[in-house]
Amino acid sequence: MSSLSPDEIERYARHIVLREVGGPGQVRLKAARVLVIGAGGLGAPLIQYLAAAGIGTVGIVDDDTVSLSNLQRQVIHGTPDLGRPKVESAAEAVARLNPHVRVEAHPLRLDAGNAEALVAGYDLVADGSDNFSTRYAVSDACYRAGRPLVTAALGQFDGSLTTIRAHETGADGRPNPTYRCLFPNPPPAGSVPTCAEAGVLGALAGLMGSLMALEVIRALTGFGDSLVGRLLMVDARSLRFETLRYGWDPDNPLSGRGAGG
């Protein structure tokens, strides 16, 4: 724990006494660079728990400003932040929570043109975006840059979470599945209502964002079984958790047999 200050040792004491984390795990968290896509419903609790856990550098990508309708679920922002860029509000909240965490703000919209350059600067990416075009751009970029991806999605009363490590192979020697193995094509435009149109349960966003943070921490410290090849599905109506297994699709356009590398 030579790279942890006395203040950090006290701050992270409840992690350090965990055998699965310990001093070495906390040092790995401090050394980590995590890119969070979106400072909204999923990103808000995710960023807070990553900061509290002592992730050394948190990058935040978001081009939006705080609006009143956000505050029902985007708990990293407050009423005084209305109209402010979300990356600015989130960075200020992180500084209040943990001054040992460095925030790199990216006030932009991630797309296929800039995703790979952004992703390449981090060790792991956590995608809490709210649209399919961003999810595909992020997952494709993570594959090309060789970065693990924790990705989640929200519905009105349901959520899902998985981890993608498509640049690696599994224990069976087959490639790990890509995001496109799980969702080959985005749904037709307009077929999935937006959050503004359909609504979303605020506490569900908190639950799923916290699960994202847990999955990121597990990946960085190396304990537990990751969600690679498993889709965790949460139903808030019945409070049921189910897991769907999925595998590599040899026809996927990224790592499939006809992808050309």
Image: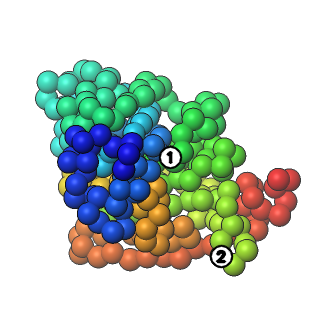
In this rendering, is residue 162 above or below 38? Answer: below
Question: Residue drawn 34% across and 43% down?
Answer: 4
Question: Residue drawn 31% across and 29% down?
Answer: 91
Q: Secondary structure at mark 1?
A: strand
Horizontal placement of 111 versus 7: left or right? right
Q: Is residue 54 at least partly visible in the picture?
A: yes
Q: Which residue is mark 1?
A: 125
In this rendering, is residue 174 above or below 220? Answer: below
Residue 228's tag is none
Type of amino acid at the residue the image marks with label 1: Val
Question: Residue drawn 56% across and 53% down?
Answer: 148
Q: Residue furthest left?
A: 79
Question: Residue drawn 38% across and 45% down?
Answer: 2
Query: Of residues 66 and 29, which is closer to you in this image?
Result: 29
Mark 2 vs 1, N-terminal side:
1
Q: CA distance from mark 2 to mark 1?
A: 23 Å
Q: Secondary structure at mark 2?
A: loop
Q: Residues within 10 Å of mark 2 (few under 14, many from 20)?
A: few
